[in-house]
């Protein structure tokens, strides 16, 4: 019998260290093993080298139960382990919790009947019933669907679907796609400007650099970076394209699937457990070459990643705010450095951080200044709301309504953008003036007319239509005040009833199918006027759109959040960029009370450099990122006195070094959320100091209280 070896095994649990187990065999670091942990059996990963030193006799070291995998063992690549370690160190997250993002227990458990999926038999009998037709419809978006999902989606019974399998209309197969040869025979066609940009990208791939692909909206950035993707796939390496979750519904994802066949997989939050398992192993054994995915695809165990792409790199949804708090854009850049490969950042409106990195020559840059179809960028003007005439008994300016009418007569599409969901963001009692609040949070409830409810946008609390004021108990005195998109819709319907409208907002389109159907209608020009929230800014292509009205151009101009100007700039440009994709002339009008504001000026004059330079100057004076680093600590508890006491004691222990500022403790701007009181500290340090080390040491000085939740947010985006 071999001498027992001790090894440390990291388990996917909320604990910041690996545990020691013994094994008779030499196991490679990264090997996935099953061990017993408390009363459970868990799969974990061999984390540390075998340690031969003698163990004290009184500590019983358990042997590992088995190595995962039948015949072949699964070994996580070193780069995946390094990445987990880095995330844990950088974001002060427990190691085990980070592992949990990569390793799911279900991946290694015995396969069940569920691991079979269905596809349409292309040679099935032509005669089908109405119900069968509904089932087949589902396959338009996905060629493989698991049976339970199919039943849930269509509402068609199990017995009908089983009969379709029996009659060979549907084919059952194991949830593991056959691998076919990738088809790269058709070269991507690029215009001369794109070709030039492509050359820069390919050069950066050789030099293993981070490169910004900075192209105006509609300039064809995707084709350019796909030409770089082809280059890597030819070499036989893997590619990861990160996208904001919402843009995974875009057309181009479907065209990518056509082009890259079974070697491409999509990683998003709506996958079934079996699909996840299949993709995870496909990436590990390099059968899957190209992943397009939301931020969590960074945690996939790539065997040999050759290129990382972050599309819409400015999109703030790359910042995950729950569970493991991290920024996927930043971590993609880091991962590329760890692997010594290139990283492409693509956008029309770079983040200020990225712009600054280009300015300092840390990142390369290439640009696309012209639209792909040869059309012009829209003309952008503002409507000065201090002077504008308004339509009688309406809040809409006459100029805007006339513009929409003229566009309608020409048979072209218009868009009204307002970044406020629902009917009225604020309702108050006409008698006592008290606002309608959420009982769980320090926020007010938003009236949504489409489902006759008041909704808290923070915690999801809902109430039916409120008749009685909770403060003065008067009846029918609640008045909606403020305007959301439903109110704009109502207003347009009143003054312009013949126009065909569509509300484009997450409340109306809350799944990919709804969004695709809506886009289909817009693309077929069945809609005259789109009334949309921020959802419309997410890179969609509206070919007939030639007019955009931004109803509240001032949103974000007065907020104190360090990124509100940046966010406003990006959203306004992205919304404006929807217009005039196919037509020569298009117009954007921004309604503002502050036409002289530098941000409005830089947008209406298309002075991109001005905006970034001003913004960087402001941040520099304020000592804010990218000129410093921030960490936010939010402490919350349902017991206020306990929280205040804990925060006070923590404050006494802060022992701040010279180069670090600690602001707070103060009540968080949202002082109550989901019935919990919230206090915060904000810590600032110079750019190159190790702020995490200080924060970690500080927090460890005070014993954890299970009734107090402490959330550390490194490089925070959210200051509420
Ligand atoms: Zn709430
Ligand atoms: Zn009242």
Image: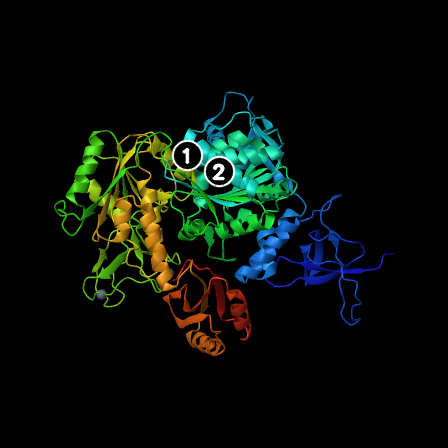
Task: Name which residue lies at 52% across and 37% down.
Answer: 202
Q: Whole-percent x and y of residue 419? A: 31, 49
Front in this rendered view, residue 92 or 281:
92
Q: Whole-percent x and y of residue 658? A: 47, 73
Tell me whether the residue at label 2 lies in contact with that at label 1, contact meaning CB atoms closer than 8 angstroms: no
**Residue at the spot of label 1:** 220
**Residue at the spot of label 2:** 200
Mark 2 neighbour class, 10 Å CA radius: few under 14, some 14 to 19, many 20 or more: some
Residue 371 vs 247, above or below: the answer is above
Q: Which mark is residue 34?
A: none
For this view, does 391 lie left or right of residue 55? left
**Which quadrant: the C terminus?**
bottom left
Residue 289 vs 468, above or below: the answer is above
Q: Whole-percent x and y of residue 381? A: 22, 43
Secondary structure of the residue carrying tag 2 is: helix
Task: Name which residue lies at 54% across and 63% down.
Answer: 92
Q: Whole-percent x and y of residue 684? A: 44, 66
Q: Which of marks 2 and 1 is in front?
A: 2
Secondary structure of the residue carrying tag 1 is: loop
Q: Image quadrant of ligand 2?
A: bottom left
Examine the rendering and report whether any part of residue 155 can be seen.
Answer: no
For this view, does 580 lie left or right of residue 69? left
Task: Name which residue lies at 23% across and 35% down.
Answer: 499
Which of the 4 quarters of the picture holds residue 482? bottom left
């Amino acid at each position: 019998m071999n001498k027992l070896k001790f090894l440390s095994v990291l388990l996917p649990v909320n604990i910041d260290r690996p545990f020691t187990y013994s094994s008779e065999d030499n196991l490679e670091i990264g090997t996935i093993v099953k061990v017993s942990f408390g009363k459970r059996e868990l799969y974990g990963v061999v984390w540390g080298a075998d340690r031969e030193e003698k163990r004290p006799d009184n500590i019983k070291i358990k042997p590992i139960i088995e190595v995962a995998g039948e015949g072949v063992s699964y070994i996580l690549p070193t780069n995946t382990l390094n990445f987990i370690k880095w995330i844990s160190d950088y974001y002060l997250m427990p190691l085990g919790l980070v592992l949990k993002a990569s390793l799911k227990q279900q991946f290694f458990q015995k396969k069940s009947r569920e691991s079979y999926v269905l596809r349409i038999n292309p040679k099935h009998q032509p005669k089908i019933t109405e119900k069968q037709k509904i089932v087949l419809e589902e396959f338009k978006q996905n060629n493989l669907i698991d049976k339970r999902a199919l039943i849930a989606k269509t509402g068609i019974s199990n017995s009908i679907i089983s009969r379709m399998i029996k009659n060979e209309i549907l084919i059952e197969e194991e949830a593991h796609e056959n691998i076919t040869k990738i088809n790269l025979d058709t070269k991507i066609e690029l215009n001369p400007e794109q070709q030039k940009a492509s050359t820069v990208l390919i050069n950066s791939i050789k030099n293993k650099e981070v490169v910004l692909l900075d192209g105006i909206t509609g300039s064809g950035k995707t084709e350019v970076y796909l030409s770089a993707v082809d280059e890597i796939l030819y070499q036989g390496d893997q590619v990861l394209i990160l996208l904001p979750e919402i843009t995974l519904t875009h057309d181009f994802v479907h065209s990518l699937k056509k082009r890259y066949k079974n070697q491409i997989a999509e990683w998003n939050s709506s996958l079934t457990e079996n699909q996840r398992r299949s993709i995870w192993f496909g990436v590990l054994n390099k059968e899957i070459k190209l992943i397009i995915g939301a931020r969590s695809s960074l945690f996939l165990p790539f065997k040999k990643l050759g290129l990382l792409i972050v599309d819409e790199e400015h999109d703030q949804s790359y910042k995950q705010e729950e569970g493991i708090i991290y920024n996927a854009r930043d971590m993609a850049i880091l991962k590329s450095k760890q692997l010594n490969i290139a990283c492409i950042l693509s956008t029309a409106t770079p983040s200020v951080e990225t712009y600054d990195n280009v300015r300092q020559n840390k990142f390369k840059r290439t640009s696309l200044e012209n639209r792909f179809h040869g059309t012009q960028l829209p003309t952008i003007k503002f409507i000065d709301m201090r002077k504008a005439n308004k339509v009688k008994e309406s809040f809409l300016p006459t100029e805007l309504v006339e513009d929409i009418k003229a566009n309608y007569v020409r048979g072209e599409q218009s868009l009204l953008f307002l970044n406020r969901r629902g009917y009225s963001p604020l309702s108050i009692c006409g008698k006592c003036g008290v606002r309608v609040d959420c009982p769980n949070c320090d926020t007010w409830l938003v009236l949504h007319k489409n489902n006759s409810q008041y909704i808290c946008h923070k915690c999801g609390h809902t109430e039916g239509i409120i008749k009685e004021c909770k403060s003065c108990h008067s009846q029918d005195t609640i008045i909606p005040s403020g305007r959301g998109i439903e109110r704009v819709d109502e207003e347009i319907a009143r003054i312009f009833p013949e126009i065909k409208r569509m509300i484009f907002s997450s409340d109306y389109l809350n799944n990919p199918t709804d969004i695709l159907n809506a886009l289909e209608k817009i693309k077929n020009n069945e809609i005259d006027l789109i009334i949309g929230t921020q959802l419309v800014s997410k890179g969609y292509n509206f070919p007939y759109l030639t007019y955009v009205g931004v109803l509240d151009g001032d949103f974000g101009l007065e907020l104190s959040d360090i990124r509100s100007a940046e966010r406003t700039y990006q959203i306004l440009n992205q919304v404006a960029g929807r217009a005039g994709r196919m037509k020569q002339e298009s117009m954007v009008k921004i309604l503002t009370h502050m036409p002289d504001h530098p941000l409005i000026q830089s947008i209406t004059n298309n002075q991109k450099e001005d905006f970034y330079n001003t913004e960087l100057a402001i941040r520099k004076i304020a000592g804010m990122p990218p000129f410093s680093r921030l960490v936010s600590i939010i402490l919350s508890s349902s017991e206020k006195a306990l929280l205040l006491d804990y925060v006070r004691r923590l404050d006494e222990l802060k022992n701040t070094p010279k180069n670090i500022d600690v602001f707070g403790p103060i009540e968080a701007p949202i002082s109550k959320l989901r019935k919990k009181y919230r206090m915060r500290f904000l810590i600032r340090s110079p750019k190159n100091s190790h702020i995490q080390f200080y924060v970690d040491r500080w927090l460890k000085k005070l014993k954890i209280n299970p009734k107090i939740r402490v959330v550390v947010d490194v490089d925070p985006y959210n200051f509420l």
